[in-house]
Amino acid sequence: MGKIKVGIAGYGAIGQRLADGVVLQKDMEMIGVADLAPTLAIRALYEKGMPYDLYLVAGADKSKFDTLGIPVKGSFEDLLDKVDIMLDSSPGGVGAENKELYEKKNVKAIFQGGEKNDVANVFFHGYANYEKGIGKDYLKLTSCNTTGLIRSVDCLDRECGGIEKVAITIIRRVADPGDYHRGLTNALQIDKVPSHQALDLMTIMPHIEATGILVHTPVTHGHIITVTATGKQKITKDMALKVFMKHPRIRVVRIDDGFLGNASFFKYARDLGNPRGDMYEIGLWEDSVVETGNDIMYAINIPQESVTIPETIDGIRAAMKMQTTREEGTNETNKYLGIKNR
């Protein structure tokens, strides 16, 4: 099998990161990105020397790009003619419209969490149900919160004798850095129970009962989720920490080392020199892992802009049958993204 040819629809917060992640995969080729307008992200792409070819979706005004000197390679359909699979990170609802073109061009696609589940054959997570995505034409990723949540619950479920139920509280950042659409606010807002993340977890892992509360908070750098998990047998703190530390996409940290909260992870990622201050791993506080009766409780940090990138690349591997087991697929993704066991 030659390199898998990949295109990206929507060059926003997720699309930029997907493009950079695909480029790192030695068995994939980034063909180009498609968008509608010369956004700041597109202008930055131009100033960086156009490392990716740019294609315009229907309705785009090419003259606006021409005025800025931004080169355009062709139309969205031109891009589809050159790829094996599309990563669709368009605004919610647009991906479903794009699917008609993907079907027309016989191109596989992976959609992000903003689309409805019925857009895809499989609601996908790289660790929890990789095998269900093998060879499928259309996959849909879980949201950033659900992606990180499932990583932690799945490893307990597999390594500690099974999980019966979980209860979660999500302290949710209100918007990404640089966003204004949520407005300026000095308030917390609570959603109705159960949160969609709990429902999504049960869709991916139907053998687990889940419920959850979500609180919107006026911050931008990451979500924090508390999890109380009930095992089929008692899970001790030592058991939980052992499996968390083994997981390459979970970074176990301590408060005494300076990881005081969400901003600590963002600063640490910048200090590591990670592009955009991104971190592919979720953070998990060793200090938060506690036995409460027969349950185990812990807290995780979700870097919302980058956490779904590895699982999306897992999706390419599954859909294109590049690797046919979760271990092989996730290991290849981790290797090329530089995600290591610590």
Image (tube, rainbow, N blue to C red):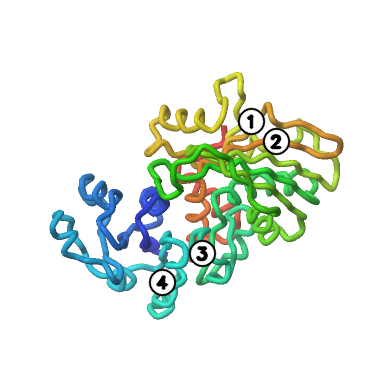
Q: Residue 152's x, y, as percent?
A: 66, 44
Task: Indicate the amino acid at tag 1.
Answer: Trp
Task: Please report contact status of discs 4 and 1: CB closer than 8 Å, yes or no.
Answer: no
User: Residue 279: x percent and y percent?
Assistant: 48, 39
Q: Up-down: is 38 above or below 100?
A: above
Mark found first going from the N terminus, 3 or 4? 4
**How far apart are labels 2 and 4 at the CA level?**
39 Å
Q: CA distance from mark 3 to mark 4?
A: 11 Å
Give the alpha-carbon distance from disc 2 to disc 3, as whole Å.
29 Å
Task: Compare residues 119 and 236 and report the one nearer the observer.
Answer: 119
- Whether residue 102 sits left or right of residue 132 in the image: it is left
Tag on residue 298?
A: 2
Instruction: Tell me where residue 15 appears, x and y as whole percent.
Output: 39, 54
Give residue 115's mark. 3
Density class for disc 3 (Cα within 10 Å; few <14, some 14-19, many ≥20) is many
**316 lies left or right of 247:** left
267 on left or right of 154: left
